[in-house]
Amino acid sequence: MSEVRDRLADTVTAVWTEVLGIDGIGPDDDFFDLGGDSLVATRLTVLLEERLGVEVSPLMVFDHPTVDELTTELEKAHADRF
């Protein structure tokens, strides 16, 4: 992984840990299997937007429910920013 991707994945993981209240989240853990729902997904996207400075849609979380998938999607959607 690149340094930029590593930092992005670390940020995504940290925010998931914060909103879900669970430590030890791995790259393939599913947001919804860990207890996430639409309200938590909305909170997650707000925090990601604040920390990353890019737009994050709740649909991104629904369509890409693992840290690895969401990180990849954020990289694609905002390649000019990272």
Image: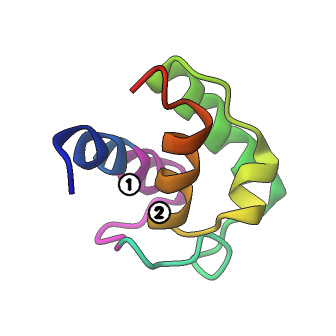
Seen from this angle, which residue lies furthest left?
3
Residue at point 58% right, 51% down?
73
Q: Is residue 12 above or below residue 79?
A: below
* Quarter assignment of residue 30: bottom right
User: Under tag 2, what secondary structure?
Assistant: helix
Magenta run includes residue 79? no
Q: Is residue 31 above or below residue 61?
A: below
Three-letter code, disc 1: Thr
Q: Is residue 44 left or right of residue 40?
A: left
Which quadrant, please, contains the N terminus?
A: bottom left
17 in magenta: yes
Please give the residue where the numbered disc 1 appears in the rendered image.
13
Residue under the image location 62 percent in, 37 percent down: 77
Q: Position of residue 79 (x, y in %)?
A: 49, 31
Q: Say above or below: 9 vs 26.
A: above
Residue 80 placed where, x, y %?
49, 21
Secondary structure at badge 1 equals helix
- Quadrant containing the C terminus is top left
Mark identifier at residue 67: 2
Amino acid, disc 2: Val
Q: Main secondary structure of the magenta part?
A: helix
Q: Please state the extent of the stretch shown in magenta in the rendering.
A: 12-26
In the rendered view, would you say 41 is above or below 29? Answer: above
The crowding category of the residue bearing disc 1, from other C-alpha atoms within 10 Å (few below 14, some 14 to 19, many at least 20), is: many
Residue displayed at 55% across by 56% down: 70
Q: Nearer the viewer, residue 34 or 1?
A: 1
Q: Are marks 2 and 1 in contact (CB under 8 Å)?
A: yes
- Between the residue at mark 2 and the residue at mark 1, the CA separation in whole angstroms equals 6 Å
